[in-house]
Amino acid sequence: MSNLIRIATRKSPLALVQANRVKELIEKRLKDTTVKLITRSTSGDTVSKAKFKKSGGKGLFLKELEELLLDGDADIAVHSLKDVPVVVDKKFIITTVDLREEAADVLISKQFNKITELPDKSIIGTSSPRRIAQIRNKYKNIEIEEIRGNVQTRLAALSNDKVDAVILAAAGLKRLSLSDKISQYLPKDDYVPAAGQGVLCIQAIKNKEYILKTLKGLVVDEVDRCASEERGFVSQFDGDCFSPIAAHCYIKNNKSTLIGYVSSTDGNRFIKTKIVENVNEMRGIGKKLAKIMIEQGAKKILETK
């Protein structure tokens, strides 16, 4: 008799692709296990833009999935780590899974191949304060059109000529087999990604920690360590998804590099700093970098509207 693991997931095409990826990994690793998807729409999918902003966006893509876990109707939930608040309810535990997909943001345009080619008064579609701030850091004459929704909704704004370009996460497009839409991968040093961008994670309630222990083999150590430091950096600023904060960590040649970014919402003031440590000394570099940037005035900049 096979064991059953029930995965709670959102209904969006991207969420289903991600949940099915975890399903595939589990069934490959645990031959005697069957995996079933339990789908739900979440508050983040249905709430109005005004209510989304008022809430700060914290946990709105998790709420209904967490209810499934608490009610015993699902065993784990699959999320994009960048959608998970850095402080989660103590009833839950989170762990990363799988290799990281490309972490960069990308430009998509029907007319232009690079962001530097966009003329003055061009309109870029994005609702991310982090992306908006980094665009405004560099391009004062580019206009922003705030668009929310799933990948398909945002691409539709481009197809309908409402905007000249959109900026999205490369990871979502690649997982949806839409890489051919990408005009430019934006350099991660110049356009710092959101903490956890490109990383999948599993959430479970603490009294079912045994499930995560069973799935421990799905964790990729390098991905988990980098994601932890990115989230450790963000945690020091008490921000939400409407705070222009970014962090990206990577390991190369036995060195770990973490780039941190904090900006005012208008993009006029920002701090971007990098820290490099040996891999065996990287634990805690997220909080270490945050402390350095706070001393440089990062929290005051975040308070600037």
Image (spheres, rainbow, N blue to C red):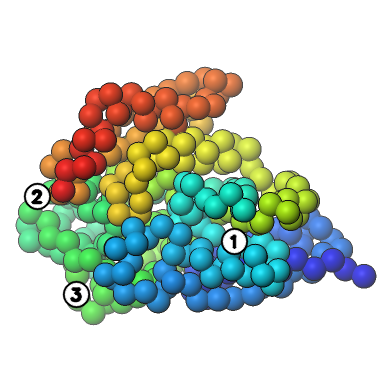
Which image quadrant is residue 236 in?
top left
Q: Amino acid at mark 2?
A: Lys
Q: Nearer the viewer, mark 1 or mark 2?
A: 1
The structure residue drawn at horizontal position 70% and vertical position 64%, both measured from the top left corner, is 75
Q: Position of residue 159 (x, y in %)?
A: 27, 77
Instruction: Please state if 210 lies on the left or on the right of 71 as rendered.
Output: right
Q: Is residue 170 visible in the rendered structure shown here?
A: yes
Under mark 3, the amino acid is: Lys
Label number found at residue 78? 1
**Cα–Cα gap, marks 2 and 3:** 20 Å
Badge 1 amino acid: Val
Residue 162: mark = 3
Quadrant location of residue 47? bottom left
Q: Which mark is residue 140?
A: 2
First in sequence: mark 3 or mark 1?
1
Judge left or right: residue 293 versus residue 36: left
